[in-house]
Amino acid sequence: ATTAKIPLFRADWLGMFVSALARARCREDLPTLKKLLEIHQKILHGETQNLALCAHSLLKLDLLDLRLQGKQPLVALAPHVKELGRLQGTSGARSACLLAHAYGSALLLH
C-alpha cells in the first residue's frame, strides 16, 4: 500500500471552482470555504493562472477579511505570488492583470 499524500484537489480544479463560486456570488457557507482554502493554498505554488483566479475570486467574493491560519487570504497567498517568475504570453498577461486588480483593490479597500 502506498502512503504518499495526495492533495484533495488539483490546482487547476481549485482555481476554476473558486472562480465559479465568485461568478455565482456563492459565499453562504464561509466555514467550508475557509477550510477548503486553508487546506489547498499550498498547491497553488507555481500555479500562475490558478493563483491569479483564486486571488481575484477572493476579492469578488468579498473575503478579504477572512482569516486563513491567522492571515488575510491575499497575505497568505502573497509568498506564492512573490515566487512567480516572468509571466509570458497572453495567459501570463491575464494572470498579471488579475493579480494586480486583486491586490490593488485590496489596498484601496483597506
Image (cartoon, rainbow, N blue to C red):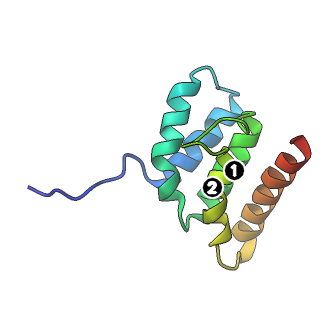
Say which of 64 and 94 sits in front: 64
Residue 25 on image: x %, y %: 70, 28
Could you tell me which residue is drawn at 58 percent across and 42 percent down? 68
Rate crowding at label 2 as few (under 14), some (14 to 19) or many (20 or more) other CA atoms within 10 Å.
many
Amino acid carrying mark 1 in the image = Leu
Query: Which quadrant of the structure image shows residue 91?
Result: bottom right
Rate crowding at label 1 as few (under 14), some (14 to 19) or many (20 or more) other CA atoms within 10 Å.
many
Q: Would residue 88 be found to the left or right of residue 2 on screen?
A: right
- Name above or below for residue 84 compared with residue 9: below
Q: Would residue 45 be found to the left or right of residue 75 on screen?
A: left
Residue 93 on image: x %, y %: 77, 68
Mark 2 secondary-structure assignment = helix
Amino acid carrying mark 2 in the image = Leu
Could you tell me which residue is drawn at 67 percent across and 69 percent down? 82
Query: Which quadrant of the structure image shows residue 70?
Result: top right
Q: Quadrant of the C terminus?
A: top right
Residue 83, numbered circle: none
Q: Quadrant of the N terminus?
A: bottom left
Q: In the current view of this chain or complex, which residue is farthest to the top? A: 28
Residue 74, numbered circle: 1
Could you tell me which residue is drawn at 53 percent across and 26 percent down? 31
Say which of 85 and 92 sits in front: 85
Residue 44 on image: x %, y %: 53, 58
Could you tell me which residue is drawn at 73 percent across and 39 percent down? 64
Residue 77, numbered circle: 2
Tell me, yes or no, whether the two marked residues, 2 and 1, touch with CB atoms within 8 Å: yes
CA distance for labels 2 and 1: 5 Å
